[in-house]
Amino acid sequence: MPSDSAVHVIDDDNAMRDSLAFLLKAAGVEVETYESALAFLDRLPKLQAGCIVTDVRMPGMSGLDLLRRLRELGNGMPVIVITGHGDVPLAVEAMKAGAADFIEKPFDDEVLLASVRASLATQSSDHEQQAARAAIAGRLAALSTRERQVLEGLVAGNPNKTIAFDLGISPRTVEIYRANVMTKMEARSLSDLVRMALVGGIIDPAAANRSAGR
């Protein structure tokens, strides 16, 4: 990872903020911490490049509000959103706001470190990005009609029971299709699946916003 980059950790919880800082420093990553999104924005003009790790629910300005503000400012620093209240609609909202990743508490240390390393790595070339989009399109095309329907239900934030009712199948059958979708899409997590669905263009922005507001 670039030696002149830092991870900017934003969390109003002192214990969580210190814990994240300790984890990252132990992995050899330079870290700066902030008790609020507003404190971070105050220092933003003087900060070195890197990535941001932020809690999603904070007083004053939430992690999602911070994401939107950064995009308004034209700041493209990768943002990793961490939450203890994660669900699919919130993941969709975070991804649409520009999050590089979405990680739910409690999380494995290596999951966070891998996300941070990826965010700090050199941005992919246009060719690599096009290749990634093509790969996702190919995986989507390989899904059966029923698997695609289950995928659409999942990224809409619907629980298995609701998907089962809508499709006229049992919840157990939905679980099987869900596992097939995760395997075929090569998704490591539900947030990874949401990201692919966004890249693949199968999430309708209006529907995603309605789901996020539930």
Image (spheres, helix red, strand yellow):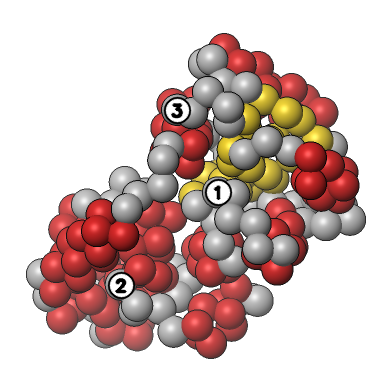
Relative side of 77 to 11, left or right: left
Task: Give the vertical position of 166 relative to 2 (above or below).
Answer: below
Mark 2 → mark 3, Cα distance in angstroms: 28 Å
User: Disc 3 designates what residue?
Assistant: 1
> Looking at the image, do the residues carrying marks 3 and 1 touch, with CB atoms under 8 Å apart?
no
Q: Secondary structure at mark 2?
A: loop
Q: Residue at x 10, y 69 (%)?
A: 142
x and y, in percent, of residue 107 in the image: 52, 34
Nearest to viewer (mark 3 / mark 1):
3
Choose between 42 and 167: the one closer to the eye. 42
Q: Quadrant of the C terminus?
A: bottom right
What is the x, y in percent for residue 72?
70, 68
Q: Amino acid at mark 1?
A: Pro
Task: Please name the residue that numbered disc 1 is placed on.
Answer: 78
| Residue located beneath label 2 in the image | 200
Q: Quadrant of residue 131?
A: bottom left
Query: Marks 1 and 2, Cα distance to the nearest angstrom?
Result: 20 Å
Mark pair 3, 1: CA separation: 14 Å
> Residue at the location (35% across, 85% down)?
166
The reply to whether the C-beta atoms of the residues labelled 2 and 3 are less than 8 Å apart is no
Q: Nearer the viewer, residue 98 or 148?
A: 98
| Residue 191 in which image quadrant | bottom left
Among the two numbered marks 3 and 1 on one chain, the one whose residue lies closer to the N terminus? 3
- Element at label 1: loop
